[in-house]
Image (spheres, helix red, strand yellow):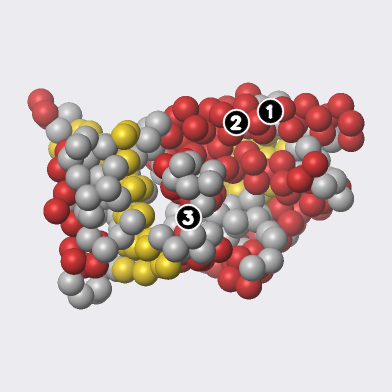
Amino acid sequence: MVAYIIDGKAIAAAIRAETARQVEVLVRDYNLIPGLAVVRVGEDPASEVYVRNKVRSTQEVGMHSWEHHLPADVSQETLLRKLDKLNEDHAVHGILVQLPLPSHISEEAVIKHIRVEKDVDGFHIENAGKLMTGQEGLFPCTPVGCVMLAKHCFQHRSQGDLSGLHAVVVGRSNIVGKPLSLLLLRENCTVTIAHSRTAHLPELCRTADILVAAVGRPQMIKGDWVKPGAVVIDVGINRIPGEGGKTRLVGDVDFESAKEVAAAITPVPGGVGPMTIACLLANTVKAACLQRSVDYGTL
Ligand code: GUN
């Protein structure tokens, strides 16, 4: 059996189209144009590409978009004052500070400084607490996207019901592994969080109905770690040497061997990646609704 290749690009495009429709309703019925401000510090080339894509996608769905670029040697104090201004600006409904930040700036202090209602990354400790305790809030974009992809693969189970499935999440980062585990728990999965020190990792992965790889190690998870018929979601984006002196992108899963065993698998690129921006835009609409007391559910 060769796995169904999950088309993250197409699913993300559908989410962006739905977001664009919601923006139209907000503009027409509430005179509200959601706005997203992205702050980038320094010259990290990957961050530059990510931010450019975020700005373009924000504009494409009809929202306001601002990019604030600060020099690599900017002080933490200056960055926090910038965030004060954005926190107070009523046209700005979402604030995202692109990570990583230069080492002299505390990411924790910066994230804590963003108003919780504008924290479209879902990284603020209060949003993390809401996720933990089952309250509504803004939740991290990549994990939300992963759950959507998993539900897409289980459409046949009353529209993506994940109840009772065993999800193994390999990776325990604050950005992906931990929030994703909590989101899957909300979907009534039985969740195991695994990491680099987990004993008998291949055997454990082989018990997963949903296997998520978010460890940042190229092609670590092999086909014989995958249970036949499992859904494999690959969050990794790693650049490795390719043919002819070029480089190529691979995930944390060894795609070629895993696709022979899994029922469904995300490719890299074109799987989880496009979902992150789509969920960021959806979070910005949600944030705008929260701030203007519009019921997001009725849009
Ligand atoms: N850097 C890599 N991924 C992310 C993300 O999801 N949000 C932010 N703010 N920075 C990132």
Q: Position of residue 238 (x, y in %)?
A: 27, 45
Query: For the residues marked 2 and 3, what is the alpha-carbon distance in whole angstroms?
Result: 24 Å
Q: Residues within 10 Å of mark 3 (few under 14, many from 20)?
A: many
Identified by mark 2, the residue type is Arg
- Element assignment for label 2: helix
Judge depth for marks 2 and 3 and give the one in front: 3
**Which image quadrant is residue 266 in?**
top left
Give the residue at x 64% y 50%. 120
- Amino acid carrying label 1: it is Ala
User: Residue 162: which disc?
Assistant: 3
Question: Residue at point 37% right, 35% down?
Answer: 6
Q: Residue at x 19, y 37 (%)?
A: 1
**Residue placed at 15% from the left, 43% from the top?**
257
Q: In terms of secondary structure, where does tag 3 sit?
A: loop
* Residue matched to label 1: 20
Across and down, in percent, residue 276 comes to 50, 42
Name the residue beneath numbered marker 2: 16
What kind of residue is marked 3?
A: Leu
